[in-house]
Amino acid sequence: MTAAAATARPTRPSRAKRNASLLALGVLLVWALVTLQFDPAKIVELPGGMGHVFYLMYLQSGPDWSYLPNALRAMLESLEMAWIGTVIGAVISLPLGFFGAKNVSSGLVSNAMRQVLNGIRAFPELVLAVVIFIPIAGLGPVAGALALGLHSVGTLGKLTAEVVEGIDGGPVEAARATGARALQVQRWGVLPQVMPEIVAFWLYRFEINIRASAVLGVVGAGGIGFLVQQTIVFNRFRLTGTALIVVIGITILVDTVSGWLRRRIIQGSGARVQGEFIEQPELVEAV
Amino acid sequence: MSLTATQENIRPPKPRPSLVVPIGLVAFLAISWVATSEQFGIGLDPGKILEDIANGVGILGDLLRPNWAFLPKTVEPMLETFRMAVLASAIGCSIALPVAFLASRVTAPNLLTYVADRSVLSVVRAIPDFLYALIFVSAVGIGPLPGIAALILFNIGVVAKLQSETVDGIDVGPIEASRAAGGNRLQTVRWAVLPQVLPNYVAYSLYTFELNIRASTVLGIVGAGGIGRILLREYKFFNFSNVSVIVVELFVFVFVIELISITLRRRLV
C-alpha cells in the first residue's frame, strides 16, 4: 500500500435521502405559506398588538387583585373538573387495560380492546364535550368532567395495557404454582408490579387534564377558560391579566407537586424503572 | 452450628405496614368527595346523568347520520388547518432547537442562562394553547395568523423541554474530543452534540406536528382559523349531521397523520 492510499479518506456516505427529505419539506413549507390566506400586514402588527394587550393587562394600572378570589374559584372548578375526569378515566381504564394486554387476556380480546381504546383516544375532549356530554348534562363543569373522563379512558387504558405487557412473568408463575385462581393471579402476580407506573400515569394525566379543562370552558363547560374568554370578549384586560397569573401559578404549582410525587412513586417502588417515562411521559403517551 | 427445626422454618419478619398507601387513599377519597360535592365542587350526580341521557339521544341519532353532502365545504378549512400546522411546526421547532441547547446543563454557557431559560419555558408551558390563541386574536383580530402564533409558542414549550432533556442525557465523550481538538462552544454543539440528538429532534418535531393538527379544533373555536371555525358554526346551528361529518373527517385525518408520523419516528430513533 502506498502512503497516499493509506491516508485516502473514506468515501462520503450518500446524502441523497437527506437532501430529498429536506427538499420535500421545503416544498411543503412554501406551498403552505403561499396558499394560506392571510394578511401579511398583520405579521408586522402582531408584536405591537401583543405589546398593547400586555400593556392593558399589566402596565396601565396593574392587574386587578380584587378579582383574585373569582379567578381562584374558577381555577378550582377547572382543577375539580380535571380531577374527576382523571378519576373516571383511571377507574374505568384499569380493568380495560388488563383486557387490552396480550399476556393477560387472549390475542383476539386484547386486539379488539386496543382498537376500542384507540377509537376513544382519537376524539379530542372538546369534540366529546360538544357532541355528547353538553347535550346530555347541559352546560357546566359536569359535562366537561365527563368528556375528560371518556378521553382519559382511551389514553390511560392504552398505557395500562402496555405496562401490563411489560411485566416480569416470574411472580405470575409463582402465583399459579401456589394454586391461585385467575383473578388472584392478577391481584398478587401482576397488580403489585404495575401499580407504581400506572399511578404515575394517572398523576400525569391529571396534569394534562388541567390544561384540557381550561379549553373546555370556551365551549361552556365552566372553569377558568370561560372566565378568561369572558374578560377578553368584554375588553376587561386587567381581569384577564389577573386570571392569567392564576392559571400560570396554579399550573406550575400542581405540575411541580405532581412531578415530585411521580418521581417518588417510580423510584420508591424499586421496580424496573422505565427511565424514559419519568422525564418524558409525553412521548410514552404519544408512541 | 445447629439450627433447630423451628428456627429454620421461621418466617422473615413482616415489614412494618407503610402509612403512605392509607394516607394516599384517604387524601384521594377526600379530594374526590369535595370535587363532586354540590356545595364545594362541581355537583356531579350519577343518578341525574343517567336520567339525562335521554336528552342526548336525538343528537346522537343525528350524529349517526352524517350529511355527506357537506363534505366538500369542509375541504378548504381542513387544508387551512394543515397549512397552519405545517408552518407553526416548522417555525416553532426551529426556534426550539437553540432554546433547548440553552436550557440543558450540558450546553448552556452559564448557570444564569440555564436558570432563566428553564423558568421562561415553564411559564410558556403553563399557558394552554387556546389561551395564547385568545390573546393573539384580541391583539390582531381573527384569522389563521393568531392561530399560527399560538401554536408556535406551544411548540416551543413542548419541543424545547423534551429536547433539553435529551441533550442532558447524551454521551459526553464527543464533547471532550471536540474541546480537546480546540473547538469553541458553537463548534462543539454543532459537531459533538447535534449529531447525537438530531434523530430525537426530528421525532419530537413530528410529534408536535400531530399535536398541532389535534389542537386545530380548539383554535378555530376561539377564532384563530381552521376546521374548528366551521365545527363551532355547525354546532351553534344544531346541524349535528354536519358536525358528524367534520368529526369523522378529523378522526380519519388525525389517524393518517399519526400513522405516517409513527412510521417515520420508528425509522429514525
Image (cartoon, coloured by chain):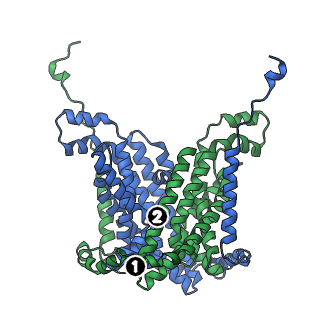
Chain colours: A blue, B green
At 67% from the left edge and 79% from the top edge, which residue is drawn?
Answer: A55
Measure the alpha-carbon separation of dots 1 and 2.
17 Å
Question: Disc number at residue B201?
Answer: none
The residue indicated by pointer 1 is B241
Q: Chain of mark 2?
A: B
Label 1: element kind:
helix
The residue that mark 2 highlights is B252
* x and y percentages locating residue B146 in the rendered image: 62, 74
* Residue A12 seen in this snapshot: yes
Please name whichever residue, B105 or B229, is drawn nearer the observer in this view of the structure: B229
Q: Chain of mark 1?
A: B
Which quadrant holds the C terminus of chain B? top right
Q: Are marks 1 and 2 on the same chain?
A: yes
State which quadrant residue B31 falls in: bottom left
- Classify residue B9 by image quadrant: top left
Q: Residue at x 30, y 45 (%)?
A: A107
**Mark 2 nearby-residue class (10 Å; few <14, some 14–19, many ≥20):** few
Lateral position of residue A99 relative to residue A226, left or right: left
